């Protein structure tokens, strides 16, 4: 199965997202290598994420927000973390709803076990 190609709008979104992550990372005094080590990826792969050349999943963004000690919403919506409508216009919503549903179910199972 061939990988989906991101639309121009999605690529702009990931580029802006990468810029926001870089801004917060630099404010925290962390290097790209620090991030790559924490995320268990190569430095080159991390650089591609920060440059907006690779798409990021919700879990990946969550891990980044944890390490940077900043809310997930603040990274995704730097102008207004409460504005979920912006995300809808940039990301295929069904994929993310499915992912978040699975994630919530898994977290609930972990908490209840």
Image (cartoon, rainbow, N blue to C red):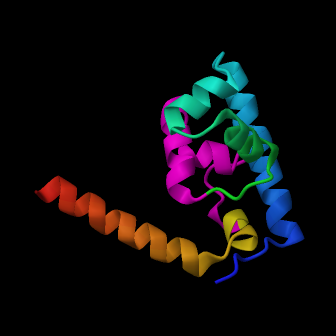
| Quadrant where the image shows the N terminus | bottom right
- Which residue shows up at 13% across the image and 58% down it? 112
Look at the picture and state if 108 lies above or below 20: below
Residue 33: image x %, image y %?
64, 25
Residue 74 among magenta residues:
yes
Q: Does the rendering let one see residue 48?
A: yes
Residue 100: image x %, image y %?
45, 67
Magenta part of the protein: which range?
A: 57-85
Q: Is residue 97 left or right of residue 6?
A: left
Magenta segment, prevailing SS (helix, strand or loop): helix
Q: Is residue 4 left or right of residue 36?
A: right
Quarter of the image for residue 78 reads: top right
Q: Does the rendering let one see residue 69?
A: no
- Which residue shows up at 67% across the image and 21% down it? 31
Residue 46: image x %, image y %?
68, 40
- Which residue shows up at 63% across the image and 63% down it? 84
Residue 7: image x %, image y %?
84, 73
Kindly give the residue lying farthest to the left in the view shown: 113
Kindly give the residue lying farthest to the top in the view shown: 29
Quarter of the image for residue 55 reads: bottom right
Q: Is residue 12 left or right of residue 81?
A: right
């Amino acid at each position: 199965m061939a990988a989906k190609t991101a639309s121009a709008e999605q690529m702009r979104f990931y580029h802006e997202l990468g810029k926001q992550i870089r801004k917060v990372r630099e404010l925290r005094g962390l290097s790209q290598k620090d991030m790559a080590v924490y995320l268990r990826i190569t430095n080159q792969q991390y650089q591609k994420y920060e440059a907006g050349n690779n798409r990021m999943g919700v879990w990946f963004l969550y891990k980044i927000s944890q390490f940077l000690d900043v809310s997930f919403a603040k990274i995704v919506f730097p102008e207004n973390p409460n504005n979920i409508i912006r995300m809808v216009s940039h990301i295929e919503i069904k994929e993310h709803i499915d992912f978040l549903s699975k994630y919530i179910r898994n977290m609930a199972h972990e908490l209840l076990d």
